[in-house]
Amino acid sequence: MGANRWRQLWHIRLPASLPVLASGIRVAVVVAPIGAVAGEWVGSSKGLGYLMLQTNARMLIDEMFAALFILAAVSVSLYFITDWALRRLIPWENN
């Protein structure tokens, strides 16, 4: 159709690559809070990871599971918010 390389990139290749990028963002948004908590296990004095370590050491299993439930709720909430936003931004993606 006579498009130069810049127009091919902007109008064809970039929009075609956005669904793959969106999949990576969906995975990253779920794994990021888990990584943050694991980082808090190593060296922190506050946060969910620290709370989980302290409650585990004191055998407060109910509080530890409450922290784990909060972590799961945050991860799932972030996933659904990100999924909703990406569906609005990339309407041509096959769902």
Image (spheres, rainbow, N blue to C red):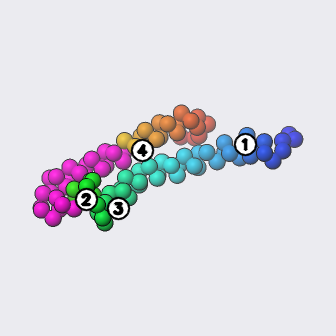
Which comes sooner in the sequence, label 3 or label 4?
A: 3
Give the spatial CA distance, label 3 vs label 4: 20 Å
Identity of the amino acid at label 4?
Tyr
Disc 3 secondary structure class: helix
- Magenta segment: 53-76
Q: Nearer the viewer, mark 2 or mark 4?
A: 2
Residue 41 among those drawn in magenta: no
Q: Where does the image place residue 6, in percent across and percent down from the top left?
A: 78, 45
Image point (58%, 37%), residue name: 90
Which comes sooner in the sequence, label 4 or label 1?
A: 1
Image point (15%, 64%), residue name: 57
Side (left or right) of 27 relative to 49? right
Determine which residue is flagged by label 3: 39
Badge count: 4
Residue 71 among those drawn in magenta: yes
Q: Where does the image place residue 50, in percent across and percent down from the top left?
A: 24, 58
Give the spatial CA distance, label 3 vs label 1: 39 Å
Q: Nearer the viewer, mark 3 or mark 1?
A: 3
Which comes sooner in the sequence, label 3 or label 2?
A: 3
Disc 2 secondary structure class: loop
Identity of the amino acid at label 3?
Gly
Local crowd size for mark 3, using a 10 Å CA cut-off: few (<14), some (14–19), many (≥20): few
Q: Kindly indicate whether the residue at mark 1 contacts the one at mark 3 (C-beta within 8 angstroms).
A: no
Q: Where does the image place residue 86, in percent across and percent down from the top left?
A: 52, 39
Give the spatial CA distance, label 2 vs label 4: 27 Å
Determine which residue is flagged by label 1: 10
Disc 4 secondary structure class: helix
Q: Nearer the viewer, residue 90 or 55?
A: 55
Determine which residue is flagged by label 2: 45
Q: Where does the image place residue 31, in percent across and percent down from the top left?
A: 41, 55
Image point (36%, 56%), residue name: 36
